[in-house]
Image (cartoon, rainbow, N blue to C red):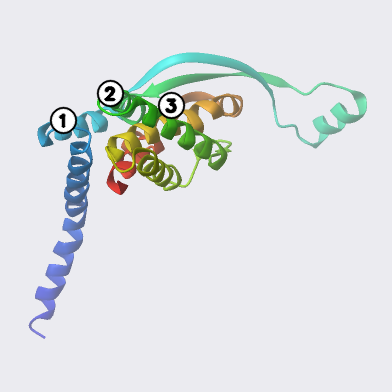
Amino acid sequence: MIYLPVTALLFVLLLLSLPFLWLAIAFDAVQLAVAKLGFSPTAASVLLLMVILGSTINIPLYERVSTVAIVPDFEELWLSRFWGIPLRKIQQKTIVALNVGGGLIPTVLALYQFTRVSPLGILLVTLIVAVVSYYSAQVVPGIGIQMNALVAPLTAAMAAILISGGIAAAPIAFAGGVLGTLIGADLLHLREIERMSAGVLSIGGAGVFDGIALCGLFALLLT
């Protein structure tokens, strides 16, 4: 009986420490992954901080104005169908932006790998991941693009290993995974999202949890 309070206290302390343990594991994983890109642990820490802070910053690229019909009620639908009265329409404005933490920084790191490893290998992996991402991604109205988080990283890792023969597979997988996801899942579906969504459409807008950054990180760890 005398050990019950102590056990309960240790259990509570364990629950409270879980977020810190998760952060420590995530930080070590990022350091390990970034080291494969040729950066020191100090540079990895700086990059992680930049990604976290940059996830709050969106750089506007352009805006698109489109005309959409308002969802009609029964009376408007009846008048439109039988009497030819047009439905009411409104103009909606969509601002397309690039998120610094989830889009810009991973893309810059991916482009930097062209100077370190085989450009042809990166281009081939990018092409493969772009095709897979395009057909795997789904555009959900009001939400955005949804895709299984492991599809692109697994594709990038396997393609990089096969194409490179295991030589410098990690940076090739990272660069091809990031660029392929950006092109296949985001850019090639951009027009569809513009027609469905009003407001700010941010590429990489989920910051460190966005598919672009996650794909690069997972691809590194898997190789």
- Check disc 2 and give the amino acid type: Tyr
Q: CA distance from mark 2 to mark 1?
A: 17 Å
SS for dot 1: helix
Q: Residue furthest front?
A: 165
Q: Residue 102 or 71: which is nearer the viewer?
A: 102
Disc 1 vs disc 3: which is toward the camera? 1
- Check disc 3 and give the amino acid type: Ser
The image quadrant of residue 103 is top left
Q: Residue 26 or 19: which is nearer the viewer?
A: 26
Disc assigned to residue 112: 2
The answer to whether residue 144 of the structure is visible from this angle is no
Location of mark 3 (residue): 202
At 44% from the left and 31% from the top, the residue drawn is: 124
Q: Give whichever of discs 2 and 1 has the lower sequence position.
A: 1
At 48% from the left and 36% from the top, the residue drawn is: 128
Q: CA distance from mark 3 to mark 2?
A: 23 Å
Q: Position of residue 91 (x, y in %)?
A: 63, 17
Location of mark 1 (residue): 46
- Left or right position of 42 against 106: left
Q: Position of residue 8 (x, y in %)?
A: 16, 72
At 18% from the left and 38% from the top, the residue drawn is: 35
- Check disc 1 and give the amino acid type: Val
The image quadrant of residue 17 is bottom left
Q: Residue 53 or 129: which is nearer the viewer?
A: 129
